[in-house]
Amino acid sequence: MRKPMTSRLALWLTALLLGGTALTLSGCDEGGDPKAQVGANPALPALTQYLLPPMNVARVVGWKQGETPTVAPGLKIEALATGLQHPRSLYTLPNGDVLVVESKAPPAPPPKRPKDIVMGFVESWATSGGSTGPSNRITLLHDANGDGVPETKSVYIDHLNSPFGVALVGNDLYVANTDAIVKYPYRPGETEMKAQGTTLTELPGGPIDHHWTKSLVASKDGSLLYVGVGSNSNITENGMEAEKNRADILEVDRETGRWRIFASGLRNPNGLSFEPQSGALWTVVNERDEIGPDLVPDYMTSVKEGAFYGWPYSYYGQHVDPRVMPQRPDLVAKAIPPDYALSSHVAPLGMVFYTADALPQSYRGGAFVGEHGSWNRTPLNGYKVIYVPFSDGKPNGMAQDVVTGFLNGDNQARGRPVGLAVDKTGALLIADDVGNTVWRVTPAGS
Amino acid sequence: MQETALTPGDHLEPTVQIAHHPIHIMLVPIPITCFVGAFITDIAYWLTAEMMWANFSAWLLTVGLIFGVLAAIAGLIDFLSNRRIRSQSPAWPHMLGNIAVLVLAFFNVLIHTRDAWTSVVPVGLILSLITVLILPLTGWLGWSLVYRHGVGVAR
């Protein structure tokens, strides 16, 4: 009698544990076709909440000798520079020199709960692209004849603090570190900045600094700077106080450094650019995680002065997020939906409007977007550069894949696209922070 | 199963022990304290929406689960390797009740990995409450095993 009792117990226990595990893992449901979530009216499924935070990180393998991303027909791609240290954004100077901002995340704060330790460990797989050397600097590429082979490559500004955005107004060069906008005197032709920078204004930085990239763009007349400040959490789990002046685009007076909130509710705004036809400010935004593989679609949008775009209280207008407390029905009521969805978890971090005329006609007038790629969705999404056609200052038509192949056949990351720029010849430049390369896209046959 | 009368000298010595000090009984207060604490910090978060309390809950549940599993391993070895212990009447319900506590705590840890409000309200708070309601019952049975049946009592 005893023995069967014991073995029955063992069986019961095993069943319980296996059942529990199966139940837990069944939370990792698969996402649908991302195409249904591209455009002005994305399909928004009901939200789900998980037992296990979904994580699906593409392991980093890097580019083998001779490997390049794949480009759409009519285009050609080559490396402009390799061997960089986590290049994240690009800026073309008026004389054609290209600034490559090499940047690493600021040191992680002490974990607030056990989840932070586990997530930090898993996310470290995604960025283990061999970038262990010195980063947090700006490298200058000088390619006088525009043949895609720089004659010189030099460290232009070193020892920066997780820099991202760059903007030149006259001879004032502004660098957006994660905690401040710093001004440098620019002299065309110099390959190394000799002067020390002066701080124009501080920005919300550590000690948490969850979304740390500060995108930067100057207004057309040069009097104002716009800077994107990402949220300090996924969805307020670091407390409301940590979100002060975050998930905003700030408008900074270039003379005095005084700033105000230009628009709010933008969870992680990057790629700040002015749309050439309307002159409106546009941004790409990373939306919230952990409520489903198809929620919430990341997006690009024009940024209206004083507007509120929902984060953290709601998304795409009035879709309330139950994870935020206290709720704010007054703010939800005035939240405006963004202009153009890019599908969920693609992580857009770079955007550039194409106003040059080197690339084929079909790429003119619209915006290229660099999608860094998902880390919490099955199947993977993003990991490519797309083109969104525009007409009359608005997106018009389906986004097209332009540069792909950042993932290999086994869904391992050879590279991940981040910031974009257009060089003086009209070629599209792509910063690849995992492949440690700057790619240059030109017309085929050039 | 038959009731066994307690007579001194019976082999009610736990298998997992250090110098006749049973490990299971040494470990058990840790998960009990942690799970009761997590219930209190869950209530504090529910009342204040202050993330610090939810973070406390997450740590308490995680530590409670780790030490609860260690205590369970020690207890299960004692249970399975000594027929005399197994045959004491409170042994079975004590074990099954505490396995239920650990299963609840496991899911509660997962619920608490969610971000902000729904990491606690309502599911996390309910699981913490049920856990804390089971603990006095299984604790009572555990104490019976020691004080009334003499499990682990040195001779």
Image: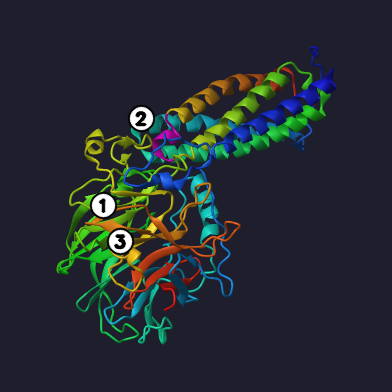
**Where are the magenta residues, as a range?**
B115-121
Mark seen at residue B47: 2
Q: Amino acid at mark 3?
A: Gly
- Give me the chain letter of mark 1: A
Closer to us: A179 or A24: A24
Residue A4 at x, y = what percent?
A: 83, 21
Q: Quadrant of residue A320?
A: top left
Whether residue A188 can be seen here: yes
Q: Calculate the distance from the C-alpha at mark 1 to the C-alpha at mark 2.
A: 26 Å
Residue A76 at x, y = what percent?
A: 45, 72
Quarter of the image with the N terminus of chain A in it? top right
- Give me the chain letter of mark 3: A
Q: Quadrant of residue B63?
A: top right
Does label 2 lie on the same chain as label 1?
no
Q: Calculate the distance from the C-alpha at mark 3 to the C-alpha at mark 2.
A: 50 Å
**Within 10 Å of the Cα at label 3, are there few (<14), some (14-19), or many (20+) other Cα atoms?**
many
Q: Which element is circle 3 on? A: loop
Mark seen at residue A133: none
In the picture provided, is A223 more to the left or to the right than A28? left
Q: Residue at x 47, y 36 (%)?
A: B57
Mark seen at residue A245: 1
**Within 10 Å of the Cα at label 1, are there few (<14), some (14-19), or many (20+) other Cα atoms?**
some
Vertical order, B91 against B31 (above or below): above
Q: Amino acid at mark 2?
A: Leu
Residue A54 at x, y = what percent?
A: 52, 44
Q: Is residue A335 magenta?
A: no
Q: Amino acid at mark 1?
A: Asn
Q: Residue at x 42, y 42 (%)?
A: A295
Residue designated by label 3 = A366
Q: Residues at badges 1 and 2 in contact (C-beta under 8 Å)? A: no
